[in-house]
Amino acid sequence: LSGRQMGGKQERAIDAGKYGSSLDAWMDTGVLVDAGQRLTITAEGQVDLWPQGAGQYMAAPKGYNTAGKGGQFLAGALVGRIGDKGKAFLVGERFETNVAEEGRLFLQIIPSPWNNASMGQFRVRINTEPGGLAGRP
């Protein structure tokens, strides 16, 4: 059983308590992407970066207006990587690319800079299809 898909749509929920409170906590989406595939990821929802003051520091998938832990991305931003050693990239509300590498797709929510666990989740839709289909609606 290879588990490889030539294309398809997946929906996932990424929980900020589990995948948004530590920089080394990545969610394995179970989606395998191949080089040359078209990858589209869309996300919606809100994450509370400081649940102690409920509702004051809410982040959408593009992140909150302050740097998150590690400083590379905004706090609360949805980021992805392909493969165990892949370079992290900003997903935000929508990410679309022709994939250059292959491997499993991992997602993470950038932790708040205040050393506390975040709460909430993003709903994520992942679509893979054969490459070369640019220009389609």
Image (cartoon, rainbow, N blue to C red):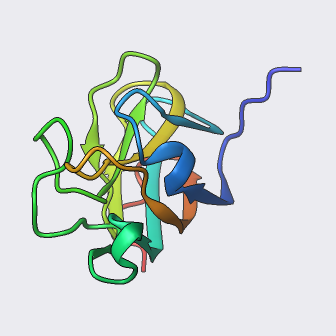
- Outermost residue, front side: 52
128 to the left or right of 86: right
Tell which residue pokes out farthest to the right in this image.
1
Residue 94 found in image quarter: bottom left
Residue 42 spot, x, y in % from top left: 45, 68
Q: Is residue 119 left or right of residue 111?
A: right
Q: Indicate the quadrant where residue 74 lies.
A: bottom left
Q: Residue at x 34, y 76 (%)?
A: 53
Horizontal relation, residue 61 to residue 84: left or right: left
Name the residue furthest top: 85
Q: Nearer the viewer, residue 27 or 71?
A: 71
Q: x, y percentage for residue 98?
A: 35, 45
Depth order, front residue of 60/132: 60
**Image point (50%, 44%), residue name:** 19
Image height check: is 113 above or below 31? Answer: below
Which residue is depicted at the point 41% across and 68% down? 51
Q: How many marks?
A: 0
Residue displayed at 34% across by 33% down: 23
Q: Is residue 2 left or right of residue 8?
A: right
Hey, which quadrant is residue 95 in on the image? bottom left
Q: Point out the image quarter for the N terminus.
A: top right
